[in-house]
Image (spheres, rainbow, N blue to C red):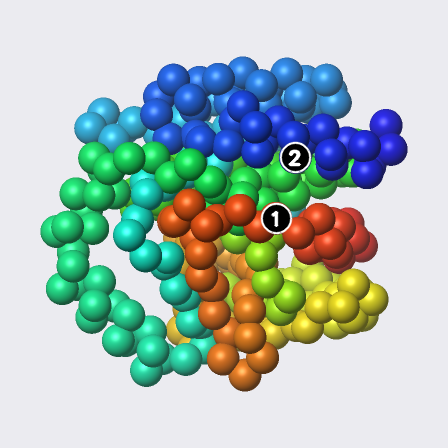
């Protein structure tokens, strides 16, 4: 199937019937759909359940214990928030102010996070990451050295990825590439743990990003934790790295997520990153 057609089909399903993936029933329907997609490609699918109070269901494609590279995204979606979450990696003063504000609002935010109304639009956070994972799965389906994971419960505190680290202690030592909020912004940020950014795969990803991104009219930025902080599942992995798309030039930022304004998913971003990753992994 031509990739443009496949992208349109996946986009229609993900932004249609499966855009909201928050309740148990919604996640169950999504899991059934994505299982059928992966098995149609000939990819083995395993659903790993964990937790009691907070129940997580991670979706693993391929053999995560034997793979040299693990590509991930979180598939759960968040509740409606009164204002968009703003992330400013690489600018510690703003990060500190943001964290202080969140501490002041901690209890109300926790109440909204667990008991609030589901956000109706999730194009960037993180339907964009799920779409990219599924496209890459089609491109790399014949690569047993690459596994894919869709994590549950990132939005409520990285519970899904935490369960994965316990279930797969060997995989924790592998190179991991996380895709989170890659659909809205014209600056590609590649960041992660220092050990991860020194891996051969990371070196190739940075080189490909610098050559491919300008062809799509996109800027690039790279920085390691702790100077650059992008809060997502890769933080739990010693060799974890992540791609995100941000706005701005000198001050990079991410907005609109967690609100009904999260409706932008640029196919240019997905195509650009798919090319970068396929060249490098």
Picture layout, residue 251 above or below residue 20? below
Picture layout, residue 94 above or below residue 255? below
Quarter of the rendering containing residue 187: bottom right
Helix or strand or loop: what does disc 1 sit on? loop
Q: Residue at x 38, y 39 (%)?
A: 119
For this rendering, which residue is in front, 244 or 121?
A: 121
Q: Earlier in the sequence, mark 1 or mark 2?
A: 2
Asked whether residue 89 appears in the rendered view, the answer is yes
Q: Residue at x 32, y 40 (%)?
A: 79
**Mark 1–mark 2 CB contact (< 8 Å):** yes
| Place of residue 29 in the rendered image (x, y in percent of width and height, measured from the top left) | 48, 17
Give the total number of marks visible in the rendering. Answer: 2
Asked whether residue 173 appears in the rendered view, the answer is no
Helix or strand or loop: what does disc 2 sit on? helix
Q: Residue at x 57, y 50 (%)?
A: 264
Which residue position is annotated with label 1? 265
For this rendering, which residue is in front, 222 or 22?
A: 22
Q: Which mark is residue 238?
A: none
For this rendering, which residue is in front, 265 or 222?
A: 265
Q: Residue at x 27, y 76 (%)?
A: 96
| Place of residue 17 in the rendered image (x, y in percent of width and height, measured from the top left) | 54, 23
- Is 75 positioned to the left or the right of 105 in the image? right
* Mark 1 Cα-neighbour bin, 10 Å: few <14, some 14–19, many ≥20: many
| Place of residue 230 in the rendered image (x, y in percent of width and height, measured from the top left) | 44, 63
Which residue position is annotated with label 2? 11
- Is 37 positioned to the left or the right of 241 in the image? right
* Mark 2 Cα-neighbour bin, 10 Å: few <14, some 14–19, many ≥20: many
Q: CA distance from mark 1 to mark 2?
A: 9 Å
């Amino acid at each position: 199937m031509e990739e443009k057609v496949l992208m349109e089909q996946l986009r229609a399903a993900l932004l249609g019937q499966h855009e909201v993936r928050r309740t148990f029933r919604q996640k169950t329907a999504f899991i059934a759909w994505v299982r059928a997609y992966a098995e149609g490609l000939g990819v083995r699918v395993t659903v790993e359940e964990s937790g009691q109070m907070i129940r997580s269901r991670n979706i693993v494609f391929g053999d995560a214990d034997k793979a040299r590279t693990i590509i991930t995204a979180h598939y759960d979606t968040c509740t409606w928030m009164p204002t968009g979450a703003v992330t400013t990696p690489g600018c510690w003063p703003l990060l500190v102010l943001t964290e202080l504000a969140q501490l002041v609002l901690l209890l109300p935010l926790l109440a909204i996070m667990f008991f609030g109304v589901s956000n109706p639009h999730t194009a960037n956070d993180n339907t964009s990451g799920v779409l990219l994972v599924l496209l890459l799965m089609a491109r790399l389906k014949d690569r047993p050295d690459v596994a894919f994971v869709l994590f549950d419960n990132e939005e409520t505190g990285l519970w899904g990825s935490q369960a994965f680290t316990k279930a797969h202690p060997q995989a924790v030592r592998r190179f991991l590439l996380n895709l989170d909020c890659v659909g809205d912004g014209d600056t590609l940020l590649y960041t992660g743990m220092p050990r991860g950014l020194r891996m051969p795969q990371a070196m190739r990803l940075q080189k490909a990003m610098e050559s491919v991104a300008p062809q799509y009219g996109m800027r690039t930025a790279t920085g390691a934790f702790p100077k650059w902080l992008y809060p997502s599942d890769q933080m739990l992995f010693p060799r974890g790295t992540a791609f995100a798309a941000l706005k701005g030039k000198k001050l990079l930022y991410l907005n609109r997520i967690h609100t009904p304004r999260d409706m932008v998913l640029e196919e240019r971003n997905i195509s650009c990153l798919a090319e970068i990753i396929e060249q490098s992994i």
